[in-house]
Image (cartoon, helix red, strand yellow):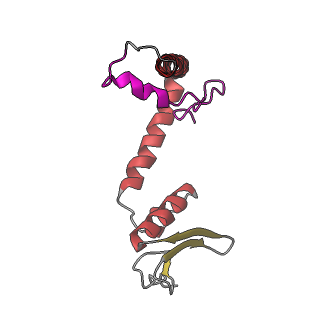
Amino acid sequence: MPPRRRSASGYRGVRQRPNGRFYAEIRSSDLRLSLGAYDTAHEAARAFDAAAWRLGRPRLQMNFPDRRLLVAQEDERVMAEWRQRHPEDVAYEQEYWERRREEDTRWRREERLDRRRRKALACAQADLINAGGSSFFTEEDERWFDIWLSTSDDTDDDGGADDWSD
């Protein structure tokens, strides 16, 4: 059976829709996986290749067989081998990130406490002036802007999980 010809987009698994967007999907006899619509054919082809690679498809069935997927696949293989050979390094790295999360949490809490103190001082100075007293802030003192500081808990302390963890 001759190989399937590529679609009008020029990429395998990518079709152009009437609205001008490009739709990517993986099809086989037992699988039909929609990968969504993209603005360019190249983006859709990259989505197709990433999904095909995850599904273990041969490189010949991909749009970019000689590009970054080879490097990524080899990196994953080498990292898995390294983890098996050096479990102490893996444990050290996990401890490092745990310490880092604790330090980040402590820093956020200290920063929040500092903002609350600065805002309280600025508000106290404003109350003092409103009561007819005089402030030790000058008119051009930047500490006046601390009145508008946000003191809400905009960071969540959920057991150390943050943007750096998986």
Figure check: 79 above or below 64: above
On the question of residue 99 being in view, the answer is no
Q: Is residue 66 rendered to the left or right of residue 97?
A: left
Residue 85: image x %, image y %? 50, 24
143 and 106: which is toward the camera: 143
Q: Toward the viewer: 80 or 104? A: 104
The residue that appears at 42% across and 48% down in the rendered structure is: 72
Q: Is residue 133 magenta?
A: no
Residue farthest to the right, as pictured:
30
In this orientation, does residue 131 appear? yes
**Residue 130: percent from the left, percent from the top?**
50, 22
Q: Residue furthest front?
A: 132
Using the image, determine if residue 42 lies above or below residue 138: below
Quadrant for the C terminus in the image: top right
Where 42 falls versus 126 (above or below)?
A: below
Magenta segment, prevailing SS (helix, strand or loop) = loop
Let me know if residue 161 is in the magenta part: yes
For the point 43% across and 66% down, the residue is 43
- Compare residues 64 and 4 and report the one nearer the observer: 64
For the image shown, how many numbered marks are present on the structure? 0
Identity of the residue furthest to the left in this view: 140
Q: Which residues are magenta?
A: 137-166
Locate residue 165, reporting x and y percent: 56, 32
Image coordinates of residue 138 in percent, x first then y, are 32, 19
